[in-house]
Amino acid sequence: MDMNKTCAVITGGASGLGEATARVFAEAGAKVTLLDRDTTRGPQVAAELGGTFVETDVTDEASVQAALSAAKEAMGGLNAAVNCAGIAIAETTLKKDDGIHSLESYRKVIDVNLTGTFNIARLAADAMKDNAPEPDGNRGVIINTASIAAFDGQRGQAAYASSKGGVVGLTLPLARDLARNGIRVMTIAPGIFMTPMLAGLPQEAQDSLAASVTNPKRLGDPREYGRLAKFIVECGYLNGETIRIDGALRMM
Ligand SMILES: NC(=O)c1ccc[n+]([C@@H]2O[C@H](COP(=O)([O-])OP(=O)(O)OC[C@H]3O[C@@H](n4cnc5c(N)ncnc54)[C@H](O)[C@@H]3O)[C@@H](O)[C@H]2O)c1
């Protein structure tokens, strides 16, 4: 799909990987709408990019329905959805002080990262299904964000890794379900990227994380994620797969 013809919603577009994706897409000529619950930074980023911001909770059906309608109207269409909204917690199953992993926090992470991703995917697919097809029948693309924690989850990542493993598992059946509608589904599994979350860590901690990457020995630049998402939009033969972008990092 040509970026000049791309009308994309980007969840989590107010920060980090979603924001970088919105910037890369807009610079390449795409129309962008940022869906985020951050009502401070979201509108600022959207204004900078000549795009639109819609306050959205990805876990909520009515909120996403309204956001997608608003986005479609603002952009004159919708043919790409990038799922970057997400949360991370660190909590062990049995804690040092005898506590047990909270079920509420587990459910919350699954709700935002996994159910939120599916909520956007199913409703965005419905909004794309009547698009005029490209010559090869493609009508749109959905890009999800997992994590290498889906494969190499660490101590304290039971909830996060479950949610991201779910996103990986969702990718192929969703691509198969939506094949008859001409909608592709891809997932990106990032390693460690320099987003606001990591920029807040002490330099020493950042250096140690960078040293753990196989090659190159640095954290990922969010724009590298955005460029991969752009390539997925442009390359119509990519479908039903998860791509790791991690400098060959394998967490032990
Ligand atoms: N940064 C990394 O190193 C890294 C690595 C692997 C995977 N990821 C994944 O990439 C995605 C983006 O991460 P990031 O580092 O850019 O995080 P970030 O915290 O910078 O951005 C996440 C955005 O999602 C939004 N959000 C959270 N819950 C929401 C909800 N219910 N509805 C709407 N918006 C919501 C937040 O407001 C925020 O703007 C996440 O899914 C994260 O798990 C990040």
Image (cartoon, rainbow, N blue to C red):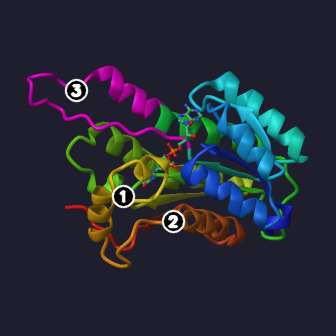
Residue annotated with mark 3: 101
The magenta segment is 85-111
- Queried whether the magenta region covers residue 153, the answer comes back as no
Cβ of disc 1 within 8 Å of ligand 1? yes
Discs 1/2, front:
2
Above or below: residue 40 compared with residue 245:
above
Q: Is residue 28 placed above or below 176 in the rendered structure?
A: below
**Which residue occupies 34% across, 20% down?**
104
Residue 134 spot, x, y in % from top left: 83, 65
What is the three-letter code of the residue carrying label 1? Ile
Up-down relation of residue 183 to residue 72 (above or below): below
Q: Earlier in the sequence, mark 3 or mark 1?
A: 3
Structural distance between the alpha carbons of marks 3 and 1: 22 Å
Please, what is the three-letter code of the amino acid marked with disc 3?
A: His
Residue 65 lies, with reference to residue 151, above or below; the image says above
Along the line of sight, the residue nearer the viewer: 159 or 224: 224
Nearer the observer, 213 or 138: 213
Q: Residue at x 35, y 79 (%)?
A: 215
Mark 2 lies on residue: 221
What amino acid is at disc 2?
Answer: Asp
| Residue shown at 61% from the left, 63% from the top | 226
The residue indicated by pointer 1 is 148
